[in-house]
Amino acid sequence: MREQAPATGRSETREIAELRRLKDEQPDLASAADLQIELLQLQKRVMSRVSLPTISLDADHLKSLLGSGPILQFEHLPMDWSDMRFLMRATASAMRTHDAIDDVDCRKAEALSRDAERLRTVARTWYESARPGAPPLDAEAGLESVFQQSMRPFLTRAADAIMARSDFSGWTKGSCPLCGGEPDLAVITPAADRLLICGRCAARWRFEQLTCPFCLNRDRGKITSFASRDGQYRLYACDVCQRYLKAYDSRRASRPVMPAVDAVATLPLDAAAIQRGYK
Ligand SMILES: [Zn+2]
Ligand SMILES: [Zn+2]
């Protein structure tokens, strides 16, 4: 009888290969890279099963929704609640192992993963918290990053489907045209445009190079911009709201932007920004 290799459920995507390389090159980033690898593997297990969003993907319909955007409502998300419960539990556990959340928040996430009804309510509150004036998470404060990771397969699937049929060129806001989330990375294209990348659904939209997406300050004298030592990344910091955004400069890159990888690779840049008083 032939012995079968155990199915590990792991596969080497390009992102995971890049994270392993980063780990070898910068051992200081090993724990953050390992966490990101685990999260990608968890999300990949669910991703292949996620269905299309329950929104009409007719291009004209999407265009009219964008007029009063953002487009995606919570009801549209292709949620599978048993997958979501699994992701909450597994994400919190991985983040706890790598000290990305504390014990209290890890237990809160575990409790939520066992309470299907409450999980739906809190997931909706988290999703809608990106709207101006929306209520905060309250009792589940501290779980924002767990939700951001656990909701990712559903959000990115919905975003990919809509982006394929939408044109965001008329969208001039600093928040996401699809889910209303904030950008957590940008990419500078070979044509020197800056595209913002949503930290929740990964949608991308063009935004003025030297305007702050968080407070819309466009006074160039109040934007501090500097590059990482290797020139691969730029950081734009706003001297009005004190927030900053990092960008991957694809003009001098050997690979496309990969938010999951670039978030880890730019941790030293975050430290530099925080040291200068930005947040
Ligand atoms: Zn988004
Ligand atoms: Zn600002």
Image (cartoon, grey):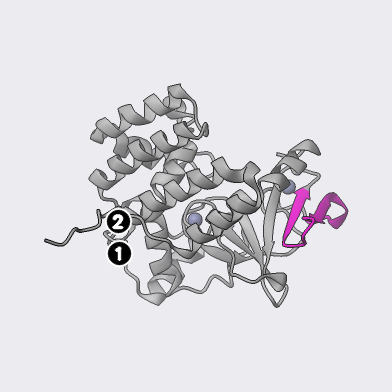
Image quadrant occupied by the C terminus: top right
> Residue sitting at 77 percent across and 42 percent down?
272
Relative to the observer, which residue lies in front, 5 or 279? 5
For ligand 1, tell me if the residue under mark 1 lies within 8 Å.
no
- Residue range highlighted in magenta: 218-237
> Residue sitting at 71 percent across and 45 percent down?
268
Q: Residue 221: say if magenta.
A: yes
- Mark 1 — residue? 52
Residue type at mark 2 is Pro
- Image coordinates for residue 78, horizontal then vertical, percent: 30, 56
Number of other residues with Cα within 10 Å of mark 2, as a class: few under 14, some 14 to 19, many 20 or more: some
- Image coordinates for residue 133, horizontal then vertical, percent: 53, 39
Mark 1–mark 2 CB contact (< 8 Å):
yes
Above or below: residue 275 compared with residue 225? above
Residue type at mark 1 is Leu
Q: Is residue 92 visible?
A: yes
Relative to the observer, which residue lies in front, 66 or 29? 29
Q: Which mark is residue 224?
A: none
Relative to the observer, which residue lies in front, 56 or 207? 207
- Image coordinates for residue 34, horizontal then vertical, percent: 50, 45
Q: Secondary structure at mark 1?
A: loop
Q: Secondary structure at mark 2?
A: loop
Q: Residue 131: say if magenta.
A: no
Q: What is the quadrant of residue 61 in the picture?
A: bottom left
Residue at the farthest left position: 1
- Mark 2 — residue? 78
Q: CA distance from mark 1 to mark 2?
A: 6 Å
> Residue sitting at 26 percent across and 55 percent down?
7
Q: What is the quadrant of residue 146 in the picture?
A: top left
Above or below: residue 72 compared with residue 96? below
Q: Is residue 177 visible?
A: no
